[in-house]
Amino acid sequence: MEVLKKLPEEVDLLLRSLSTLNVNGQEYKPTEFVLSNYIFFMCVALTVLAIIMYVAVKNLKMVPDSKVSNAVESLAQFVRDDIAAGMIPHGSKKYFGFLATLFFFILTSNIIGLIPGCKPSTGTMGVTVALSTTVFAYFNYVGFKNQGFLGYLKSFVPHGVPLAVAPVIWVIEVFSSFLRIFTLAVRLFANMYAGHIILGIFAILTSLFIEPMIEHLSAGSVVGALPSIGWLALMTALYLLEVLVAFVQAYVFTLLSAVYIGAAAEAH
């Protein structure tokens, strides 16, 4: 169809809009120190989260009557009971603050990214790698603190493994531990980035089919715009799905972090 000839050009513009640029929408060299668009929205997410927490704590009561306080308390209890306590058998309260910070920051960033014109800071590898590296440093710190230096290093080899293959198992386990930095980062980044590409493509298709009707209203243009109703319906359904994905990805990242912390906290 004639309108679809514009699709490749529009997709190129979409991909450019989702790439990492400076806040003015211009490309920059790796050696330049600039405020990128994703880092800007990360700062926005941090600011919004700080305001939400301030309002929630300010209105905190024995029986909260604030919707913000109720929502924050419900989510905090979810992290405490379903994630921290569920994945860390002993002493989960010590790690609750770290896990809750991860969960609320990722969730806030993901939700902000769904607002038209905004971007999720989790939609770039720079931020997700920083998050996963923080998790990596934290669970190793917990391991060394709880098991001691040698004890933690020995814990990479399960009990009962023959001495001859123990060094090979140790190297593999240490390597897989480092891989967690990338698996955590890529999982979060890929889901958020891919979701926004799909939403963008459906938005482009909706606009391409409806543009002729807006420019020139006629019976033919109205008929030609009918497919836009389907694209709009699909985009709306996907948008609602992305809201769920925003929560699920925050949950999965925090859950895996709790699993790694729980494994490092106790000898096996």
Image (cartoon, rainbow, N blue to C red):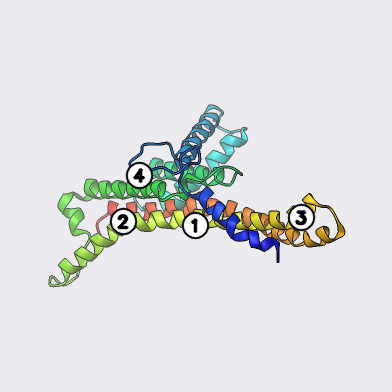
Kindly report the distance in space between the C-alpha atoms of the residues bearing marks 3 and 1. Answer: 33 Å
Return the residue at label 3: 212
Quick one: label 4 or label 3, which is nearer the N terminus? 4
Quick one: label 1 or label 2, which is nearer the N terminus? 1
Kindly report the distance in space between the C-alpha atoms of the residues bearing marks 2 and 3. Answer: 59 Å
Q: Name the residue: 36% across, 53% down.
A: 89
Residues packed near mark 1 inside 10 Å, few (<14), some (14 to 19) or many (20 plus): some
Residues packed near mark 4 inside 10 Å, few (<14), some (14 to 19) or many (20 plus): few
Return the residue at label 2: 263
Circle 4/circle 1 CB separation < 8 Å = no
Q: Is residue 158 visible?
A: no
* Rendered-image quadrant of the N terminus: bottom right
Secondary structure beneath dot 4 equals loop
Say above or below: 249 vs 5.
Answer: above
Quick one: label 2 or label 3, which is nearer the N terminus? 3
Residues packed near mark 3 inside 10 Å, few (<14), some (14 to 19) or many (20 plus): some
Say above or below: 248 vs 52.
Answer: below
Return the residue at label 1: 191
Please state if 198 lies on the left or on the right of 28 as rendered: right
Circle 3/circle 1 CB separation < 8 Å = no
* Residue type at numbered disc 1: Asn
Q: Give how far across and how far down residue 88 sits, in percent.
A: 37, 52
Kindly report the distance in space between the C-alpha atoms of the residues bearing marks 1 and 2. Answer: 26 Å
Return the residue at label 4: 30
* Rendered-image quadrant of the C terminus: bottom left
Q: Name the residue: 23% across, 45% down.
A: 145
Secondary structure beneath dot 1 equals helix
Given residues 51 and 44, the one toward you in this image is: 44
* Residue type at numbered disc 3: Pro
